[in-house]
Image (cartoon, rainbow, N blue to C red):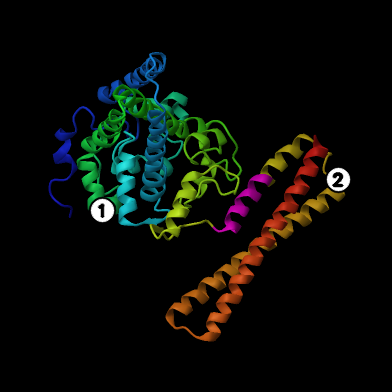
Amino acid sequence: MYPEGHFEARQTTRSFFARMTTGSTSARPSRRVNWPTTLFLFITPPVAISGTVWWVASGQFNRATLALFFLTWAATAMGITGGYHRLFSHRAYEASGPLRMLFLLGGGAAWEGSVLEWCRDHRRHHRFVDTERDPYNIGQGFWWAHMLWLVFNRREPVNPEEVPDLYADRWIRLQHRYYVWIAIGTSFLLPIALCALWGDLWGGLFVATTLRIVVNHHATFLINSLSHIAGSQPYSDSHSARDNWFTALLTYGEGYHNYHHEFPSDYRNGIRPWQWDPTKWLIWSCSRLSLAHSLRRVDPEKITAKRLEMQEKHLAERLRRFPGALTGVAQQTLGAAREQVHQSVERLVQLRAQYQRLKHDLRSGTTAELHRQVAELHGRVHHAEHDLATTMATWQSAVRGITRTAA
């Protein structure tokens, strides 16, 4: 069923560095130490910190090297966020061949494992979140979710049946097979060679390479740890994931984790214009350049329904503590605002369904009248989205007023 000579036959070629920063668990995590991964994770931080301090104190500091540090950090981080995560793990959009190759190289430079390993573990995380089968289950503690799951991983070979869509891609298979050499070349040799061009080989080793790897590692790890214990849950409290602006700042937009766990197929994590999500902006920009297409966005009425559900739940909990706060007038105001939101959601759902049917008819056979109807319905959908935003704002205003009264 699969080409011969796949992963299991290649395990010996991935000795010391083979699974530096990836891991997985089955039903229960193994307590057997993965020494190559452990040594890498615990040696690189002191080397990076002491080397960088020496680099600055000894007068080796170089602006070009510092600029390369930030450039390579952005490239490797977005190789993970835009490539490994949103493109390969969740299929939130489609990318052209050149863009996919850049993500395979950039993500590989992060030393977080191959696409196949990373995506396998991440899909398990979503499927089994907060259970023993979640590779980085926050229920086992902050440090387990942050990095100890890597220390005690089982070095489990990738089963192609778990990621058949990714395994079908020959370039992804090649990246997995030669991951060690790709990571060494892109993460170590290239930045060190570039820094050597301007006479700063040690800066290339300590800053543009080791420090960048450590910073990127722990920024990524914070999504698995901090974003599951600190922050808000505006869309669901059925899992531990939380929206956290601090982790979003460090991970190019990945910190809006509560939203992501509810709507993992959305190419955005930060859906508000003011939310920091450079990965979203990169993907959108690539779509304008014909490097990406089929960007998936969750319909606003579905997002609103989740937010409304959570706000109603929080309000009910608050009013139980202050049973006399909700007067007859307040009940009427709140009920009317809630009803308006529900009506707006239902109307938008109906209009969107009609619009999709007409677009399907348009593909089957085009007429001037059909084009006119599609254009008209598109305008009505846009107007309904605006109306939903307005009614939701009215509801939130009513909730804030009642909350202040209850306080």
Give me the residue at 67% from left, 44% from top. 313
Taking the image as shown, residue 325 lies to the left or right of residue 260, namely right
Q: Is residue 329 above or below residue 198?
A: below
What residue is disc 1 on? 169
Q: Which quadrant does the N terminus fall into?
A: bottom left
Residue 260, given in percent of the width and then of the height, sits at: 50, 45
Residue 150, given in percent of the width and then of the height, sits at: 34, 28
Q: Is residue 120 above or below residue 360?
A: above
Region of the chain picked out in magenta, as a range: 299-311
Q: Is residue 133 visible?
A: no
* Between 234 and 200, the one nearer to me in the picture: 200
Per the picture, the main secondary structure of the magenta-coloured stretch is helix
Packing grade of label 2 (10 A; few <14, some 14-19, many >=20) is few
Give me the residue at 24% from left, 38% from top. 182
Is 318 a magenta residue?
A: no
Give me the residue at 34% from left, 46% from top. 103
Q: How many marks?
A: 2
How far apart are labels 2 and 1 at the CA level? 61 Å
Q: Which mark is residue 327?
A: 2
Taking the image as shown, residue 75 lies to the left or right of residue 323, namely left
